[in-house]
Each structure stands twice: as structure tokens, then as C-alpha cells.
Image (cartoon, rainbow, N blue to C red):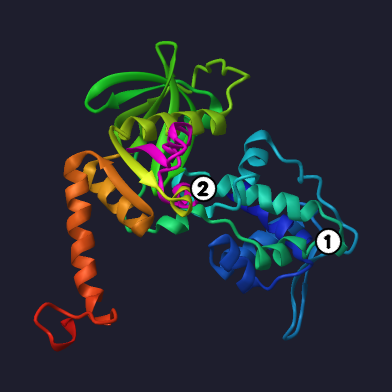
Amino acid sequence: MRAARLMSLVLLLQGRGGMTAGELAQELEVSERTIHRDVLALSEAGIPVYADRGRTGGYRLVDGYRTRLTGLDRAEAEALFLSGVPDALRDMGLREIAEAARLKAAAALAPGLRDAPATAAQRFHLDAPGWFASDTPPPESLAPLARAVWGNHPVSGRYREAPRAVEPYGLVLKAGIWYLAGRAKERLLVYRVDRFTEVSVDTARRFDRDPAFDLAAFWAERSEQFTRSLLRTRVTLRLSPAGLRMLRHVADPAALPEALASARDDGTVVLAVESPAVAYTQVLAFGPEAEVLDPPELRALVAEAAARMSGLYAEDAPGGGPPGSPSAG
């Protein structure tokens, strides 16, 4: 642990040119007394670190000194590509690896480019989990599953209380929920991470990944299959030309290709929806640009809604107004 901290201290000084004991202590999450001891140890080991006195002083490396400890190992290099999603890194237990990679990358930059990471971070930041902020802690099984994914180690555990052995291929964060793509009994499946318990990682073994596996493509395909499986209700509509143009904005994206393929010259389309309640909401979004032809129950509901809406606006029409009012005739 101390050796890693000493290396991080050298990389910090090399990357930033100079830092006070307080800044180093805050960065490395130790006391200033520990920083003083670490600097002394580095000096005794031959690392040319020295202290600048005065109000703007701090610790620095002798000009021109470059450590050779800037090479990234595989885990650090892979984690570096996830450095834009800090919450996900923390939840997967990979934050320390990514931080070591960031320090090494910064230290390896030429002096004139050392501020590039800072200036880029001021302008661009990707934090996908932040869109789905929640006080719910990450599942306990996430960190061991992440280590298994990183190292191609098979895992065993219980999934929905049943024993399960899986070769973990990848993790996906969707709407605040973690999913695992894994192979079990020669089939690639999707699991919810929070439904895994008693996870054990077999670090003594590695499985051979399918080199053709594409996590993004696999997830897109399974997501579409899942969405289409929810679209169990069919409604028939007659759309005006304006309604046909609105279709792609109202329909579920997974239902759109089928709806467009079903369109007839008179504007009739068959639209797949999740439930009658969802169909009712979508049809109302069309306003007067859609007429429900089938099922009859949905047509009756929309007709009732149209009548109520007409009553709300009747008093604004010429000669209109609620029944019995002076303006009603």
C-alpha cells in the first residue's frame, strides 16, 4: 500500500510540477505528517524531490527528472477508457485502478500539455449514472462480478435463489439498473446484477471469450427483443397525412417499422402497444389526426375523451358555451 502511495506521490509531482503537503495529503487521502515521512523516504531512495520554502512553496522534483513508472498495465489501460463515468467505476470497485492510470497518463505528457486533462475536464464530462441519480447503493454482487468480467474469471452463485455458474462477458448500466451479459450452458443471457447472491469468483481459472462478441450490439439486440415482447396489444387507426407524419414521434420505436409497413393508402395503420392504457395515451397524443377503428373499447374511450374536451372548449366557439348558457343559443 505504501509503495503504491509513494509512486502516486512522484507521479503527482511529475505531472503538476509542484504541490504543497496539504494538497498532496488531500489527493492521497492521508495526513500531512504522512506526506512529510513519504517525501523523506523518497529522498533516501534517491528520488530528487525537494522542498521550496515560503508562502508559495511546496514539494517539487528536480527539473528534468522523469520517472520510468509511467507505463500502464492492462487493467489500468482498460479502466482509463471508463474514466468519464466515475460513479460506475466506484460502484464496480475500479476507482483506484483508474486513478493510477490517470496519474500515469498525466505524468507521461510533455510539460506543455500537462494541463490538457484539467482543461478538457472543465469542458467535457460524461456521467451517465447521474441521469438516474438514486440513493440506492449498488448491489453487493456488482464489485465481484466486475472483477470477474475484467479478468475473464468464471463465477458461481445464486440467481433468484437457484444455483448458477456463469462466464461473465460484460456489464451494462441501464436506467440505474446493472445487468450482466454472461454465457451459461453455451447460451448468452442477460441477468440483473441485483438478483445475484453468494457470488464467488474463481480467480484460478480463466474462460476463453468469443473474440467476435460485441457487447453493444448484443445489448441492442436483446433490448429490442425485450421491448417487442412487451408490445402485445394491436390497435387499428386511420391517420390523416399529418397523423402519419406524427407517427414516428408517438409510437414506440420498436413498433414503428411494423406500423409503417402496415400503412394503407387511406391512412389505416396497425400499431403495436404495450397495453390498452398505453394505447389510449398514444391515441390522444394524435389529437384530431387519428381515428380509432379497432378495438371498439378503445374507440369508445377516445370518443368519450373527445366529447369531454369539446365541452371544455365549447364556450370559446362562436355561439358556443355550456348547455343552457345564454351564449348557447
- Residue type beneath disc 2: Leu
Looking at the image, how many numbered discs can be counted on the residues?
2
Does 83 sit left or right of 233 as displayed? Answer: right
Q: Residue under circle 1?
A: 113
Q: Residue at x 24, y 28 (%)?
A: 160
Place residue 198 in its image quadrant.
top left
Callout 1: 10 Å neighbours few (<14), some, many (20+)?
few
* Above or below, 42 relative to 194: below
- The x, y position of residue 103, in whole percent, is 69, 53
- Residue type beneath disc 1: Leu
Please give the label number shown on residue 77: none
Q: Residue at x 69, y 56 (%)?
A: 41
- The x, y position of residue 307, in whole percent, is 19, 63
Residue situated furthest right in the rendering: 64
**Residue range highlighted in magenta:** 245-272
Q: What is the secondary structure assignment of the residue under circle 2?
A: helix
281 vs 5, nearest the viewer? 281
Callout 2: 10 Å neighbours few (<14), some, many (20+)?
some
Residue situated furthest left in the rendering: 324
Q: Residue under circle 2?
A: 89
Place residue 237 in its image quadrant.
top left
Q: What is the secondary structure assignment of the residue under circle 1?
A: helix
230 vs 45, nearest the viewer? 230
Residue situated furthest top in the rendering: 186
Inspect this view and state whether residue 188 appears: yes
Q: Which residue is drawn at 67% across and 34% down?
A: 74
